[in-house]
Amino acid sequence: MRATYEQDIAELRRIVFGSKKVVFFGGAGVSTESGIPDFRSKDGLYSLTYAYPPETMLSHSFYRSNRDDFFAFYRDKVLRGVLDAQPNTAHRVLAQLENSGHVQAVVTQNIDGLHQAAGSRTVHELHGSVHRNYCERCGTAYSAREVLAQLEAGCNDHSDAPLCTRPDCRGLIKPDVVLYEEPLDNTVLNAAVAAISSAEVLIIGGTSLVVNPAAGLVQLFCGSHLIVINKSETTRDTSADLVFHESIGAVLGQLE
């Protein structure tokens, strides 16, 4: 007989609270409940009409060859949504579980910093963060708010790209996010590999596991319990101990 939702939740609680080595691997579905659109959802960026496909506009080559268009898109469809967003139940519960000694690490494909805003300390950001920005010429760091302020003001020097404010520099400010065509940061990647490989419990949440190489990391898990929480089916459903095709906030909220 198939277990009921209540029985699955009870088993989820037993597994999570019975372990000190839980790792969470999350994707865009974690942040959609904070109002940040999923690139691949029918209402997300991929369904919108631009002069170029979003994959092209968020690529390294486009950043280099069409920087004004890149930053216009980045301002409108990335920064504005992210900087107004607040952590949701899933972010808060994961932070609580880390604080209570159950969650060891969060591995995320998101660039919004909401896990840290909720209080999580060990967060491996595979695709970087909008909150870190640096001048490509002198290395000066800038916050996302500083970058957005330049973009909202129309920038300067007849350019729509943010430039270093040091008068002796004026280099281009690049977001510390992994664009299409760019490799993952080795330090972050190695930390994520170590966390997933040593986990007793892996919770996959809010991701359809289609973006590689990040999604391929879950294949390194060899622990005791695999749990999947995603509204649609994933390639790991058949091998998971528990599968919830529900809101991730609703499911993780049962662990408060």
Image (cartoon, rainbow, N blue to C red):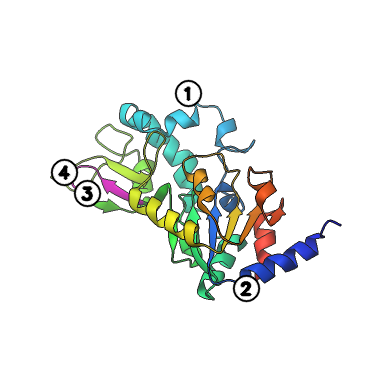
Q: Which mark is residue 139?
A: 3
Query: What amino acid is at disc 3?
Result: Gly
State left or right for residue 143 relative to residue 195.
left
Disc 3 to disc 4, C-alpha distance: 10 Å
- Looking at the rendering, the stretch of residues picked out in magenta corresponds to 132-139
Q: Is residue 78 magenta?
A: no
Which quadrant of the structure image shows residue 90?
A: bottom right
Disc 4 to disc 2, C-alpha distance: 54 Å
Q: Nearer the viewer, mark 4 or mark 2?
A: 2
Task: Classify 10 Å Cα crowding around label 1: few (below 14), some (14-19), many (20 and above).
Answer: few
Marks 3 and 4, the one that precedes in the sequence: 3
State left or right for residue 240 relative to residue 118.
right
Disc 1 to disc 2, C-alpha distance: 51 Å
Q: Secondary structure at mark 4?
A: loop
Query: What amino acid is at disc 4?
Result: Cys
Q: Nearer the viewer, mark 3 or mark 4?
A: 3
Q: Secondary structure at mark 1?
A: loop
Percent across and percent down for residue 7 are 79, 65
